[in-house]
Amino acid sequence: MVSKQNINVALIGNPNVGKTSVFNQLTGLNQQVGNYPGITVEKKIGFCKLPNNIKANILDLPGTYSLNASSIDENVVIELLLNKNDKLYPDVALVVTDVENLKRNLLLFTQIKDLEIPTILVINMADRMKFKGITLDIPYLEEHLKTKIALISSRKGYGIDELKKLIVSYRTISSEPCLNASVIDPEYFNSLRKAFPNQLLYKLWLVITQDVNFLNLERNEVRSSFTKSHSDLKRLQQKETIKRYQFINDVLKVGLKIDSSVARDYRSKLDRVLTHKVWGYVIFFLILFVIFQSIFEWSKIPMDFIDASFASLSTHAAEELPAGVLTNLISQGIIPGIGGILIFIPQIAFLFMFISILEESGYMSRVVFLMDKIMRKFGLSGKSVVPLISGTACAIPAIMATRNIENWKERLITILVTPFTTCSARLPVYAIIIALVIPDNRVFGFLNMQGMTLMLLYLLGFGMAIFSAYILNKILKIKGKTYFVVEMPNYKLPLFKNVGINVIEKTKAFIFGAGKIILAISIVLWFLASYGPGEKFNNAEKIVIENTINNPLPETEFENAVASQKLENSYIGIMGKAIEPAISPLGYDWKIGIAIISSFAAREVFVGTLATIYSVGGSDNEVTIKNKMAAEINPVTGEKIFNFASGISLLLFYAFAMQCASTLAVTKKETNSWKWPAGQLIFMSGFAYVVALIAYQILK
Ligand code: GDP
């Protein structure tokens, strides 16, 4: 727990300097991940035991290049550092830097120093120094940067204990700025100082230049008397950056030596191949291919295991517990509901394992660089590639994978369009309907029509995702930074600890975020399918016996007939009938209506539900379901229910409709608002309805 007695430590640094690794080293698994209030930036707090029984709250702030905010991530950093009343306001700041990029990383350091917070300079990746021929004059740097330095390697764990000791003695660390802010424009800054003698000069400057919330200073007051034109401010900011770099250059000239004869350059050679106009894409698609093969292959066993365990748990509960409503709720609602959440874990875990490895190794930045130009035309970012492709497994981990897209608009668009890509849950639905309505013919002797249809459906999903991204980009009015920076980090062997922690964090976020909502919806659907008003539901057995009195059914068929009678008259059955007028123009009857409603929890439920309705036991008995479905006649028109027109209409409906409560739950979690999932539901399902309607009306 965050405690006032603990030392508050803020981890600050540019992206890719190893901040997360330092955080993991200090806190291990003692981490809490949440969101900053009102926005979607992740807030990570961890706890760390220091020498002498002292404890620290470690706050991992989002990676930022400077305090000149251009993204919500950077705003978070500035808001915290300006607000002394915040309960996480740091007693000591750790600015983490990469020894290979010290010059650029120190810009942020000098800005933090100007806020007069005791600051420790953490120089990370010390293990690379020998390899790159780098030597540092630590005492010289400490003196001129007015700080204490911890030279560490978070990969090897060097220097972490010294860093902990430094944190404990934070009171002895200078909080003096290392460069005088007023050199930026002496006249302007002197008048500022006179007007607000009790305020920190650099804070005033940030209040004037940044669009941040600020609690204990009247921003308007400062701004009204010291406003400058936009171009003047920009000019001053540039001057600030130049002055800072001059200072940093002077210090590093003495403090840092590089013997370039030592360094070997494999990096640029590798870069040339991996970002090549042709080979770059080939390699990327090969890697993707391997990843998806593995996700499907490796997930199958644990998924089947989870499925089977929960099925037997549910049977067990039904047998062992005293018969009654509570037992039914447990065995048919809660246990399958929890199973329905846990079944996603293998795919989520494997996907994030691969993503973390690609990120950790430095390869992901090359992919982003490669894809960015293409994706940007559609309002997406190079980083949208991973979620869009992951969507073919499941939209849930895919949407969670959008977190590293910094620009909020691009991230939101990616979240909104990802569910269009064909996920694995659509596959059973597609498979059975294609088998029913598409002839098993070959065109040109080798193209199988059914296979072609399946491929077209995949392409349709992907095309729709890209197309709607293009439209959303035009209509969403969200400002965001427009420039593109990809950091090209060095290639590195991934750190097992980082990968592991990332996988655990993502899985936890899914279970406790979206999981709750999925469970609630499963329980509601269970209730709707297990209860019904009136005689027809309550006396289902009697009715079936009476109807078949002359021709008694064998036991399983009898049970199926009762289940079918019950389902028809349950609340969900009544709902299916109620929506019949709305779906009959699409070519569906009320039975398909029930399947559509119940498959809202998860698409693959569609086949199982139809199996129950058509009184066939066991959803995996496909031949029987298929034959039953194929024989089903519409009593009004006298035609087959599953004909070419209604089949195509259903395929299109499932391709576009937002038939997945879990995805909505994840969208809610990731966007922090019900507005976006509601929009997804209305637009996707509305669009699906219209397309299915048009298709049926043309084809019938
Ligand atoms: P962040 O973006 O600042 O949070 O950085 P990460 O902690 O994700 O690390 C970026 C990359 O640097 C990853 O590939 C890490 O494995 C790697 N890394 C982190 N610390 C060290 C280190 O001390 N030495 C080396 N060689 N690599 C490191």
Image (tube, rainbow, N blue to C red):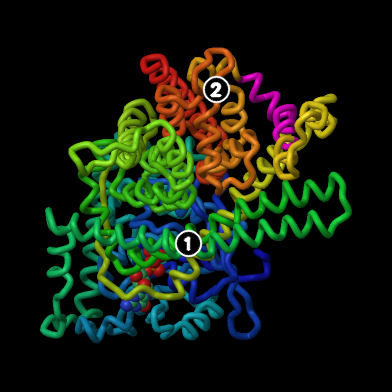
Residue at image location 71% in from the left, 53% down from the top: 335
User: Relative to 618, does residue 655 appear above or below in the rendering?
Assistant: above
Q: Where is residue 158 in the image (x, y as percent from the top left)?
A: 41, 85
Q: Which amino acid, by three-letter code, is at mark 1?
A: Ser
User: Relative to 633, does residue 7 appear above or below in the rendering?
Assistant: below
Write down the quadrant of residue 690 in the picture.
top left
Observer-nearest of 213 and 32: 32
**Magenta part, dominant SS:** helix
Q: Is residue 123 visible?
A: no
Observer-nearest of 206 and 27: 27
Q: Which amino acid, by three-letter code, is at mark 2?
A: Ile
Q: Position of residue 287 (x, y in %)?
A: 28, 61
User: Relative to 163, does residue 424 appear above or below in the rendering?
Assistant: above
Q: Can residue 458 be seen in this view?
A: yes
Ligand 1 shown in quarter: bottom left
Residue matched to label 1:
299
Report whether 93 appears left or right of 230: right
Residue matched to label 2:
633
Q: Where is residue 549 in the image (x, y as percent from the top left)?
A: 81, 29
Q: Nearer the viewer, mark 1 or mark 2?
A: 2
Q: Where is residue 500 in the image (x, y as percent from the top left)?
A: 48, 70
Magenta residues span 562-579
Residue at image location 47% in from the left, 62% down from the top: 299
Label located before the other in sequence (1 or 2): 1
Specify few, some or many for label 1: CA neighbours under 10 Å numbering under 14, 14-19, or 20 or more: many
Observer-nearest of 415 and 36: 415
The quarter of the rendered structure image containing the C terminus is: top left
Is the CB atom of the residue marked by disc 2 within 8 angstroms of ligand 1's nearest atom? no
User: Relative to 226, does residue 93 appear above or below in the rendering?
Assistant: below
Query: Judging from the image, what secondary structure is the residue with disc 1 in?
Result: helix
Gap between marks 1 and 2, in whole Å? 39 Å
